[in-house]
Amino acid sequence: MDHSSLTQLLQERLRFEAKAKQAQAAVLIAITNEQDPKVLLTRRSILMNSHAGEVSFPGGKRDPSDTSNIVVALREAQEETALNPFDVQLIGDLPMQKSKNGLTVKPIVGLIPPHIELQPQPTEIDRIFFASLKSLMDAPTIPYEVQYAQQKLYFPSMQVEDEVVWGLTARMLVSLFQNGLDYKKEWPLLVNSPNLNLK
């Protein structure tokens, strides 16, 4: 696949749903508009009540005053990363997703200038980083172990920029690849545990 015009392809393929349902939460998938586009990701503070320490897109729950999914995504991105909404060129949305606690989440996709100055909101975000869209597409699927009360489950994950991307964020990226770039990344619900060489 020719990676030279990924942002162009996204702009050609993505649209906004004509009658978008109001989601309970929304995230902003912000992609730098450059030759090797990069995706804006955050690592949530370990002090957060939910998804602490996990990689995610800027985003959060709807406020009563929010008039649309787009408003939720832009407001949350500004609160978490100081991203000016006027720096975002909105290009479309992706199908609704459900978080593990049952919230409906709408991904909103937009382009942002490269080398943009951002500032993490310290009570919510530990780190802001950018991952190359191409490297995410090419990243191998690695089993990620999650310990539940009675058992360990292994979820598919990608590793980029020394971070593990899994769960809802990874599923949204896979949806972005498929809907925005016509690229199908195999993404099972669960993966087998890694083969451990037990001596």
Image (cartoon, rainbow, N blue to C red):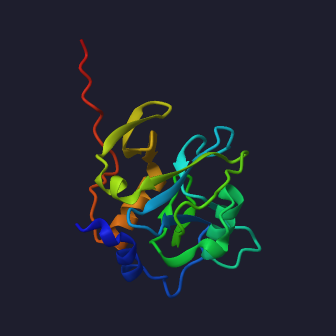
Q: Quadrant of residue 66?
A: bottom right
* Residue 26 lies in quadrant: bottom right
Looking at this view, name the residue that lies furthest to the top. Answer: 199
Relative image position of residue 173 (x, y in whole percent) = 41, 60
x, y percent for residue 31: 48, 65
Residue, far right? 65
Residue at 37% from the left image edge and 46% from the top image edge: 158
Q: Quadrant of the N terminus?
A: bottom left
Residue 112's spot in the image, x, y percent? Answer: 54, 69
Q: Nearer the viewer, residue 186 or 121?
A: 121
Looking at the image, which residue is at 35% across and 65% down? 177
Instruction: Give residue 104's position: percent from left, percent from top.
Output: 55, 65
> Which quarter of the picture shows residue 81?
bottom right
Relative height, residue 142 to residue 197 (above, below) = below
Q: Quadrant of the C terminus?
A: top left
Say if 55 sits above or below 32 in the image.
Answer: above
How many dots with numbers?
Answer: 0
Residue drawn at (70%, 79%), measured in percent from left and top? Answer: 67
Q: Residue at x 39, y 59 (%)?
A: 133
Name the outermost residue toward the bottom. 18
Of 195 and 27, the residue lying toward us: 27
